[in-house]
Amino acid sequence: MPGLTDKQEQLCAESRWDFSDLRAVYINCTLKRSPGQSHTQGLADRSIAIMERNGVSVEVVRAVDHTLAPGVQPDMTEHGFERDDWPQIFERVMAADILVLTSPIWLGEKSSVCTQVIERLYGTSHLLNDRGQYAYCGRVGGCLITGNEGGARHRGCSGGSSARSSDDIRPGLRTHPAGPGLQGVARPGLEPGRGQGSWYHHWYHGTL
């Protein structure tokens, strides 16, 4: 796990909030199976370190290491497939308060694995909790992207739209690619604070 910068350590140390009762699950949608090096995981590790430094319990799933049957039903073994690992992953998603999807950019698009994970998430979005609410009610979703500028923005747009379509996931979206497409306060050429406002503008107007 990478060490935090001095600024990140300072922000964590000065935080007055207690997040020790929260759990997060990161689903890494790299195309590389374990133990192959995943640059997407490298970015996620920085985010995970900040989460853990603030008391959040974190679990990581590398989707490509599992057999995910195609489809939009909760368990595709009930629809003719011999194996489907999604029900076990879904249990881990439901045990968490925060879901973060991470994906590389290939040919300007999120990975095929990420598309499949989003399809499976959508396939369980109709389920209800014991209060009669949609199963994802009150949860927070986000995404971390590695790739080029245009692809990162496109992925942020499609990821945000998918999150809004999965009932009651509240997107806390932050696009953070490796190239010059950085959003928010880190985006090159933007004044402090201006980028964050730009990100909020794009999010609420549905263009990010």
Image: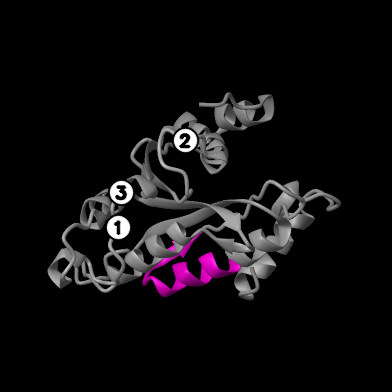
Tell me where residue 157 appears, x and y as whole percent: 59, 68
Q: Is residue 16 visible?
A: no
Q: Name the residue under label 3.
A: 66
Q: Can residue 101 be seen in this view?
A: yes
Q: Which of 30 and 122 is in front in this view?
A: 30
Q: Nearer the viewer, residue 160 or 138?
A: 160
**Within the image, what quadrant is residue 137 found in?**
bottom left
Cα separation between marks 2 and 1: 19 Å
Residue for point 61% across, 32% down: 11
Specify whether 201 is left or right of 22.
right
SS at badge 3? loop
Specify whether 92 is left or right of 157.
left
- Amino acid found under the numbered disc labelled 2: Gly
Q: Which of marks 2 and 3 is nearer the N terminus?
A: 2
Q: Name the residue under label 1.
A: 68
Proximity of marks 1 and 3: CB atoms separated by less than 8 Å: yes
Span of residues in magenta: 157-171
- 162 over 178 or under it: above or below: below
- 65 over 171 or under it: above or below: above
Q: Residues within 10 Å of mark 2 (few under 14, many from 20)?
A: few
- What secondary structure characterizes most of the magenta part? helix
Q: Name the residue under label 2.
A: 36
